[in-house]
Image: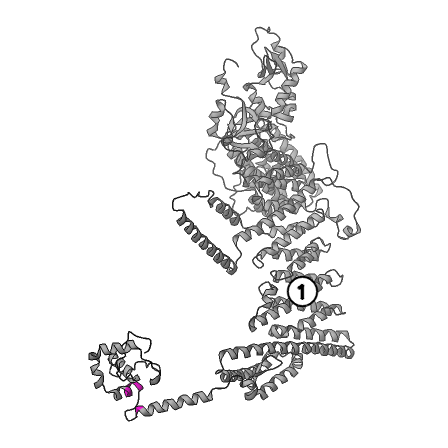
Amino acid sequence: MRPLDEDETTQVLEKLHKFVGSNLKHLIERQATEGLDSKPGGYCFRLHKQRVYYVSESLVRRATNISREKLCALGTCIGKFTKSSKFKLVVTCLDLLAAHAKYKIWVKPSAEMSFLYGNHVLKSGLARITDNTPQYQGVVVYSMSDIPLGFGLAAKSTQDCRKLDPTDIVTLHQSDIGEYLRMEDEL
Amino acid sequence: MPGRPGRPSPAKNMSDDGGRRKRKQRGGGAGTKLPPLPPQIEDDEIEISDEDLEFVQQHKDYAGFMVNLDSKSISRQVLGLKPDEDVEAYYEKRASRGNEASTTKPAPGEPVEDLPVKTLSGDLHYRKASSGDAVDATSISLEDRRTLVRKGVTIHTDDVPAKEATESAEQVTEGKEKKKSKLERRKELKALKRKEREEKKLAERPERESKFASIAEQDMEELEEFVDTQQRRSDMRARMAEIGTSLLADPDNNLGSLKELQEMCLDRDESTSQLAMLSSMTVFKDLIPGYRIRPPTEKELDMIVSKEVKRVRDFESALLRHYQAYVQFLVKSAKSKSKRLTALRCICTLLEAVPHFNYRDSLLKTIVPRLMASDDEICKMSANAITSLFNNFGKHSGEATVEAVQLIADLVKLRNCQLRPEAVQVFLALSFDEDLVRSSTLAAAGQPTSKVNEKKSKREEKKEKKAKKRELAAKLRKEVKSDFKEAAVLPEVREYRKQQTLTLSSVFETYFRVLKTSLMPRVQRELTEDEEKAGVKLLGPRPLLGASLEGLAKYAHLINVDFMGDLLDVLRALASGGKVSEDEEFSEGTTSVWERLQCCIIAFKIVKNNMDALNIDLREFYVRFYNLLFEAIFVREEEKSGEILAQALHAMLWDGRHTDMQRAAAFVKRLSTLALHLESAEAMAALVTVRHLLVRYKKCRNILENDGGGTVGGGISTYSPEGDDPDLSGALSTILWESSLLAEHCNPHIATIASTILTMNNSNSLVLPTLTPSDAIRDYRSVLTRVEDGYSKPKRKKARRSGKQPLSDFMSSLQEKYDFTETAEVPQDLVKPVEKFLTSHFKVMKALYS
């Protein structure tokens, strides 16, 4: 477990910025509520076994008591570095993203399952989209009952979405909560 | 009989009587009905062909009975002679009668002296019969006409006897002429007509001139006689009245006196000329026909037309000439200082009354720039005229609307949106037929898109023939269609649609231009003298924005989806206070709170109307609205502010099909916070909305009983009351303590609704009265401001007073004691005890809920 170096930090923050935009500030400056400390600390990023965790500072302090080999995980895993040292967000960060997301799309109940099996969201499945979404913006995908289902990239801007065919892709799939079942071992 | 070989001509002696005899037999009737006689032909004229002879020879045996026929009695019977008359005598008589007729026939070209005479008044007279008295009558009428007009008697009545006389004379002429051959008569008539026309022309000109000359002379004399201007004025007024009456009584003949009226308009005396302007306006209003006069083309002029048509044509052209002169005069005098108001009033009235008539465009061109006049009266007048033009588009079949709208659009463009708001406000009177748009789309969808491919078959020739036939039929149909189109009085739907499109595009162009210029940084520029005169400085930085927003809200459903993106961008920028970007800020003229609120409303309306295209979540507008709510408390400029707030609440939170739970909670929290600060009516609106949101979003009811903090807030554990973004406010992790406080509100209705909100979680069945924010504002504004009435409840609401609370007790006791209204100044000695009480009250509340 160690803090991220500069290169890694930029990679992580850039990735997060794609989804939460200017809310990234809130995400980093957020005050922690867990723990018994009278003075609640903030949150920070930690790298452990090629995975990046979003952890409260008090938890980090306590985690130092455990040796590196024995420590499985701590806080919330938000992503991992691949072998070629590229950063990838994983589905466990969904809660964090959903709370701060700037751009959202909602899928129709009929298209929910398809997305949860790892498919892209088509125009026919699109129920609602945030106004003024640019192309290739990171978006959080919600069900109609406002449950976050996953996240991805907007394949088209909101304006272009109007003219799309029902079979065209609106959102490129990146991760969804179906992965908790499908990729249980990897997580 | 000749030339009819099949018919037996039975008599051997070949006399005419023989044929008649045979017929008589065939008829069989015993003299009851006379058979028609064959044409009278002399015996020696009949030729007998060989065939006939042969026929008779062949059937000789059958003709035997002919010999025995009683020819005498038969011919007597046929000719209808009395029994004692002889047939021979009859024939003699008939022959002599024929000779008489031939001798009385007139020789061609003889009867020149029968020609009727044309008088100056254009009536025909028969010289021989009654020329003397008829001519006398007309000449008298001519002589007297002028004086009669003076007396206010119409000429029409005077002309009647003369006309009758001439008419009877004409009848006589016709009777005499009947026997002339057709060709001759036609020739004569033509010549007559030509002659008439020439005479008429010659006669009319000097007459009119002499008339005016004499009137002018008389006027001059009058002037000399009555130095007193008052006298002159009243005289002129009387003259105007005379002219007016005579014109209305018989417009055909008195059209010339319009010129006199126009000369009066040019009078040196202001009041006289103004009066003349007004009276000629009234006269024109009544004279102008219900159609637009089209000057005849050269081809039409060349054609020979009937007298009737000619008369109408002359009248029309004369009227048009006079009207043109009048309109030109009006346009000119609209620029002068003294006559401006009257001239403009005339123009406005004419526009309202006869918008279909010629020269409408010049009237419009004069009136539209007056929309930016500094004078309130003129501005209002022209606005009213244009509004009525828009309202009565049936009068001019929509053409004037298009013209006016385009002129206004040009004006706005020219003045760079520095105009009075009236210029754009008139657009609100426009009405667009939505069915038209819909039907057009339907029709377009219904049209067959694919063409049937014609196959080549063996019977090519036949097909060609068929095609030719079809072509012919199509041609015919086309002709019929075009004829029908000409005949149809109402313009076609397509025409209407075209007009509507033109109007709409101009209107939206104007609106968008206003929005765009409102966004642009204002360049400080020196006001020219002209602009200062027009009162530009008084207008403020964005004079047209309010009116444009209002219009956009009204016509939001007609905006093309293609414009939606750009429009939303502009609105977004305006809603954020006219800032294009974060770092750029204008010191002067950021948009007001209400304008920004309206931007939000419009955005929602537009999106709502285009819901079927794409359901869009207007997140940024929610953010703006969330922030504006705070500002809205402090700005209470106008009466309408409450309505705008209610509208916004309704559009954004009430109608919105789907909102985030987080966002809903944030709005619930903020609205109830606001309700503590707002006036009763607005507070009511806010609370009604809160209740509505809580009913719709069940999860939000967590906010009613929260044990403090926790992760229900989706990761945001603390509520930030001043936060900018409703999604990040963390409202779900706080508690709605405001409703408890509001349950103690001095207004029983608000207290009631606050307590229902509080108990929402416990009660299972929620039967809600349907009270929208707008209703709340309307109902409670009137009722609730009257504190002294003890908050009489509005009609529809059943308010049930919850158990007497100490605060409301205290307040009611205060009301009884001092009888103050909310706006009145509170007496100083009151402040202390109230302060004391409220402090203690809030302490208790804090202890209760923290």
Near mark 1 (Cα within 10 A), the count class, few <14, some 14-19 or many ≥20, is some
Examine the rendering and report whether any part of residue B755 can be seen. Answer: no
The reply to whether the magenta stretch includes residue B80 is: yes
The reply to whether the magenta stretch includes residue B277 is: no
Question: What subunit carries mark 1?
Answer: B
Left or right for B766, reference B294: left
Q: Quadrant of the N terminus of chain B?
A: bottom left
Query: Which colour assignment does the render follow?
Result: one colour
Closer to us: B633 or B443: B443
Q: Quadrant of the C terminus of chain B?
A: top right
Image position, residue B498 (x, y; %) = 57, 50
Image position, residue B51 (x, y; %) = 29, 76
Residue B384 quadrant: bottom right
Residue B25 quadrant: bottom left
Image position, residue B469 (x, y; %) = 43, 53
Depicted B729 relative to depicted B84: above or below = above
Residue B250 quadrant: bottom right
SS of the residue at dot 1?
Answer: helix
Image position, residue B7 (x, y; %) = 28, 75
Amino acid type, mark 1: Gln
**Circle 1 sits on which residue?**
B324
Q: Residue at position x 61%, y 22% from top?
A: A16
Closer to us: B106 or B703: B106
Left or right for B537, reference B397: right
Q: Residue at position x 66%, y 55% from top?
A: B383
Examine the rendering and report whether any part of residue B329 can be seen. Answer: yes
Q: Which residues are magenta?
A: B75-87
Closer to us: B413 or B638: B413
Depicted B6 relative to depicted B470: above or below = below
